[in-house]
Image (tube, rainbow, N blue to C red):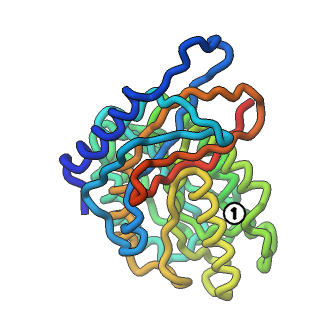
């Protein structure tokens, strides 16, 4: 299901009212504030319970807090005025079931709105292998999604995610996202590693995605080494992907502990989430270098906002 244009009008009008009424600092020295842009996605809490996207959302007033202090919103740019830059990353050692989903992935890319930019890359042994650099030719990007070899690898996906964030530097600031298809496990940590949720590779990937305003969406799919693993190990991988997505303002998708029968339900929801993604720019009054926590709120209690949990300023 796709959102109709009228639905976007409801969301966008609400946000524009917030921007025009935001309190701007009147006597702040230019050196005491800086601009920060983060990706946010907006939907209703009922959608979480019903597992179904709604078409109309009333946001009411939007607020941003950094390190618990209210900040001034400068702009909220939507799909209508800020094209999406999306990097699709596929873990190359996924089991052969993934090849049954490639046609739907290609269709998803081909259906992206005009003006979108897409990059396609495979993660092999922790290293990123680019199949197609960022392009606004969706047919070319879709054609670069090719059969996965399914060979075993000794590294997980997070170093590849880390590297992929670098490619956003050449693009304008705006709506940015990564779609990662992975089992979420860092095989180099050992087949029974219980610390998958907090590996250094993942933490670096999260920090770099937050710093560059990239929301990471993920689809869990078993890899050659993990497809016959016990449910506990599988849950570690799914939990790791969930942490990566939640910390960066994205969402993770999976169906139990078996390989998904179809990616279509995931991709339909992802299409709506990307259409509801906004690039929110605000004035930060915190000049201290280091990590800053972020919170985005709405005065409508029925609204749920996904946003990066913070970012590292240096």
Question: In this rendering, does residue 308 appear at all?
Answer: yes
Dot 1: within a 10 Å radius of its alpha carbon, few (fewer than 14), some, or many (20 or more) residues? many
Q: Nearer the viewer, residue 286 or 263?
A: 286
Up-down: is 122 above or below 266?
above
- Residue at point 68% right, 40% down? 67
Q: Quadrant of the C terminus?
A: top right
Q: Position of residue 165 (x, y in %)?
A: 60, 42
- Residue at point 58% right, 50% down? 248
Q: Position of residue 308 (x, y in %)?
A: 58, 48
Relative to 180, is 265 on the left or the right? left
Residue 50: image quadrant is bottom left
Q: Position of residue 92 (x, y in %)?
A: 58, 63
Relative to 264, is 156 on the left or the right? right
Instruction: Indicate the secondary structure of the residue bearing disc 1.
Output: loop
Number of labelled discs? 1
Q: Nearer the viewer, residue 110 or 244?
A: 244
Residue 52: image quadrant is bottom left
- Residue at point 62% right, 51% down? 161
Relative to 259, is 159 on the left or the right? right
Question: In this rendering, does residue 171 appear at all?
Answer: no
- Residue at point 44% right, 71% down? 99
Up-down: is 157 above or below 67?
below
Q: Nearer the viewer, residue 6 or 61?
A: 61
Say which residue label 1 marks. Answer: 156
Q: Position of residue 69 (x, y in %)?
A: 64, 37
Q: Quadrant of the N terminus?
A: bottom left
């Amino acid at each position: 299901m796709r959102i109709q244009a009228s639905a976007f009008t409801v969301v966008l009008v609400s946000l524009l009212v917030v921007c025009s009424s935001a309190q701007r600092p009147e006597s702040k020295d230019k050196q005491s504030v800086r601009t920060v842009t983060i990706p946010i996605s907006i939907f209703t809490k009922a959608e979480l319970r019903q597992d179904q996207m709604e078409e109309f959302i009333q946001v009411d007033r939007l607020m941003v807090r950094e390190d618990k202090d209210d900040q001034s919103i400068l702009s909220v740019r939507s799909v209508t005025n800020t094209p999406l830059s999306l990097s699709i990353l596929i873990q190359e050692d996924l089991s052969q079931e993934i090849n049954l989903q490639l046609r739907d992935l290609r269709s998803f890319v081909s259906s992206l709105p005009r003006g979108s930019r897409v990059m396609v890359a495979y993660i092999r042994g922790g290293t990123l292998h680019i199949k197609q650099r960022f392009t606004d030719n969706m047919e070319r990007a879709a054609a670069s999604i090719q059969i996965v070899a399914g060979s075993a690898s000794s590294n997980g996906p997070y170093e590849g995610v880390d590297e992929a964030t670098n490619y956003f530097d050449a693009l304008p600031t705006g709506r940015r996202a990564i779609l990662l298809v992975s089992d979420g496990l860092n095989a180099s940590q050992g087949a029974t590693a219980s610390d998958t949720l907090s590996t250094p590779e993942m933490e670096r990937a999260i920090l770099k995605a937050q710093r560059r305003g990239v929301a990471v969406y993920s689809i869990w799919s078993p890899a050659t080494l993990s497809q016959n693993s016990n449910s506990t190990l599988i849950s570690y991988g799914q939990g790791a992907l969930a942490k990566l997505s939640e910390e960066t303002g994205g969402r993770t998708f999976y169906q139990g502990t078996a390989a998904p029968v179809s990616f279509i339900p995931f991709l339909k929801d992802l299409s709506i989430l990307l259409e509801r993604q906004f690039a929110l720019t605000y004035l930060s009054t915190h000049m201290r270098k280091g990590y800053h926590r972020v919170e985005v709120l709405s005065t409508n209690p029925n609204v749920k906002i996904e946003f990066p949990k913070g970012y590292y300023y240096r």
